[in-house]
Image (cartoon, helix red, strand yellow):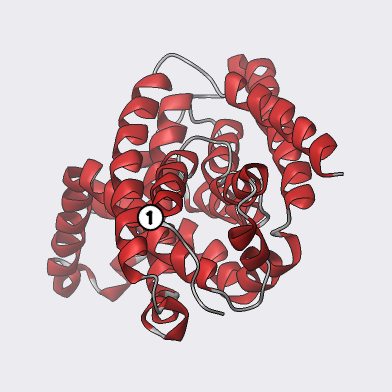
Amino acid sequence: MLASLSYLQAIIMGLLQGATELFPISSLGHGVLFPALMGWHNLVNAQSQSESFFLAFIVGLHVGTAVGLIIYYWRTWAALFRGLFEQLRGVSDRGVSSLWRINEPTTDANYRLLFVLAIATIPVGIAGVLLEHKLRVLFAKPLAAAIFLSINGVILLIGERLRRTRGRHVRHKQIATMSTRSALAIGTSQILALFAGISRSGITMVSGLTSGLDHEESANFAFLLATPVILLAGLYKLPDLMGPLGDGLRMQTFVGALCAMVMALISVKFLTRWFTTKTLLPFGVYSLVAGLLCVVRFA
């Protein structure tokens, strides 16, 4: 299919992706619903096709979003990889097994967090490779996205409810001391975000809250975890953009990716401050109301 994407559409979709990937309201869901609401039939028709220029375009937006996250968290990532090098330097003394025995006193704290993030990335990475394309083709339709966006709202509201009722009984944890079991559970929950309408950051935060993290820790873990997931997903699909599907589209994709990067940077700055004192409640209400209204619209 010949690419049909204006620069205005590229800019708007880039800004939308950069914001909704981090706000717990589903970038994929809004990426399906917004073009349908705007009457952009060139994008709507391309979304659920097995191979289309729109999917190649989305690859660039994901990479742009990931770059925005890397810019914001670059000091954290630098510290994490310094921890990896420190841990590797000690392998000769402690043995190769020290690389996965992360609860020992000699384990570098930054390496431990990097290890936990890597563990949490594995389930959604495998599921993404096996299922992402199939689920996108099957469910990247306005009505399905609206239904899942409503479900996303319910998940966020239930997560907040569980946090309030269990809060006084759950000992507060920090991501630096999170167990690999908790990290694996949180990472596995991200698989639900393969359905258009379920938010990756939202489901990760709810899983973090139910694991004993507070809102601030859950948000930071969600954004750190999103970085490799989004970046690797984009790089994995990059050949689509470099191939025939990207013909006549690469400059628009570059512009859209820049917009996604800037908006991701703005969004993560806002949200990390927001979750120091506030909750998921308004995002749950928005997702539920917007989802139900779109169900009525597209039913």
> What residue is shown with label 1?
7
Q: Which residue is more in the foreground, 234 or 119?
A: 234
Q: Which residue is more in the foreground, 164 or 153?
A: 153
Q: Which residue is more in the foreground, 94 or 149?
A: 149
Q: Residue at x 72, y 29 (%)?
A: 288
Can you say whether 31 is above or below 242 in the image? Answer: above
Q: Residues within 10 Å of mark 1 (few under 14, many from 20)?
A: some
- Given the current orientation, which residue lies at the most extreme bottom position? 244
Which residue type does callout 1 highlight? Tyr
Residue 30: percent from left, percent from top: 59, 44
Snapshot quadrant of residue 236: bottom left
Q: Is residue 197 left or right of residue 80?
A: right
Q: Which residue is more in the foreground, 178 or 149?
A: 149
Can you say whether 253 is above or below 201 in the image? Answer: below
Snapshot quadrant of residue 252: bottom left
Q: Is residue 62 left or right of residue 183?
A: left
Q: Quadrant of the C terminus?
A: top right
Where disc 1 sits, the SS reads helix
Residue 110 visible within the image: yes
Residue 151: percent from left, percent from top: 75, 39
Q: Quadrant of the N terminus?
A: bottom right
Q: Residue at x 59, y 26 (%)?
A: 283
Q: How many marks?
A: 1
Can you say whether 277 is above or below 72 in the image? Answer: above
Residue 284: percent from left, percent from top: 65, 26
Residue 113: percent from left, percent from top: 33, 49
Q: Residue at x 24, y 73 (%)?
A: 95
